[in-house]
Image (cartoon, rainbow, N blue to C red):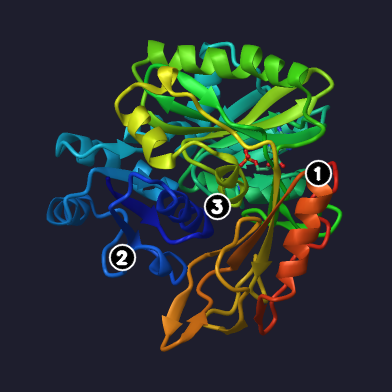
Amino acid sequence: MRALILGRGAREHALTWKFSRSFRISGLYCVPGNAGTNELATNFPEISETDAAALINVCRRERIDLVFVGGEAPLAAGVVDALQEAGIPAVGATAAAAQLEASKTISKDFMRRHGVATAEAAVFSDIDAFEEHVQSLERPVVIKKSGLAEGKGVLETDDKDEMIAFARTILQDDQILVEERLSGYEITIFALTDGTSYTLLPPCADYKKAGDGGTGPNTGGMGAICPVPWVTPELLEEVRVRVVNPTFAGLELEGLQYVGVLYFGLMITDDGPKVLEYNVRFGDPEAQVVLPLIKSDFGNLCEAMVEGKLADFPLELSTKTALGVVLASPGYPGSYRRAIPVDELPLDNRKELMVFHAGTTTDGDRVLTGSGRCFTVVGLGRELLEARSTAYAAVKNVRFEGAWCRSDIGGMIFGQ
Ligand code: AMP
Ligand code: GLY
């Protein structure tokens, strides 16, 4: 099997690594890839992951059997639809299904239509109606931009002037949701789907804030664990009944089924699990901790997905725990430095330790940073503590100027 992975983040490095361990793989390619994927695959850094025509050309030239799309941009741009039309099997959502991630008003309406547990919300396109609603609020809310915002589209405040100022900017070219503020703790559940059936992967938790103890600004995620020891089988069953089953029934009813990954971002409240958001892809850094726990051959798993045979696939999972710590560039999540030379990296990925690159490039023999989140260091262990000590011991060996990370990944924090 010749596989092509789209993306340049640590999530895509983890996917490439997972494919590289498959006995089925005879060729591995990345568009655009990074310095980490370059060790395992052939990168095509000059091609854009959203350029469907260029991707189809590469697939034909390199005789690609399967494309795995990592992130939301190519999905929302319709890359999977174009690949399908060209007869190239792909794992990833269609543009229509990607709207469930790209538009919070569309996903909220979808959840309402299909009885999926979620927070109450009102939608506004007009500042006057928004102001009137906000002035009459009696309970805490969060204000959300409808469209994609890379983690910066949610305002959590009780200050009405701040809400109105935030809304004014957003309403210039988007809609706003005023959503009931939920309290509890957050988890992420991934479903793999072949368009007719689905399989759930073990639950993950993502540490979203920049600072220890869940303080500071929001980020794309500063660390993650999988599975989550405080999630019980009873809770997972409730998630299945109240969230996952009605979602898949809704996708089928509306003809939105696809081959790929569906991400349920959940708040576990006193009133049960509620959906905060859908994403139509793996999370980053969640992918870096969930993928190492898949024991089945990844090439076989992806083949079962594109062939609609997931229901018959004997998915084998590890009983270990994975913990990932993100090393970020100075300044992140604000404006941050790029192209910082990396002085030291732990040696090759081992059985219990992986270092996944994000957006890195090379200059001669040196690795240079390229994004805000630069590496995810993942430790595996029999339980959380062992995974945590493996990951943090290796974090010290990833050295570049100004590198920083959270020191409390793996702890149970409300607000994460
Ligand atoms: P979202 O992009 O919708 O996942 O929101 C990003 C983050 O904002 C979530 O991970 C939560 O931490 C927070 N958030 C979103 N919606 C709510 C809500 N209704 N109540 C409380 N916190 C929320
Ligand atoms: N870590 C959250 C996301 O990938 O959306």
**Numbered-mark total:** 3
The one of 338 and 411 positioned closer to us in this rendering: 411
The picture places residue 217, in percent across and down from the top left corner, at: 73, 58
Residue for badge 1: 415
Evaluate if marks 3 and 2 touch, with contact meaning CB atoms under 8 Å apart.
no
The picture places residue 396, in percent across and down from the top left corner, at: 74, 74
Answer left or right for 143 relative to 385. left
- Residue 150 is tagged as 3
Answer left or right for 354 relative to 197. right
Amino acid, disc 2: Thr
Residue at point 51% right, 12% down?
113
Residue 177 appears in view: yes
The residue at the far bottom in this view is 364
For label 1, the SS is loop
Residue at point 65% right, 65% down?
333
Answer left or right for 178 relative to 86. right
Vertical order, 257 against 209 (above or below): above
For label 3, the SS is loop
Evaluate if marks 3 and 1 touch, with contact meaning CB atoms under 8 Å apart.
no
Residue at point 52% right, 65% down?
358
Evaluate if marks 1 and 2 touch, with contact meaning CB atoms under 8 Å apart.
no
- Residue 42 is tagged as 2
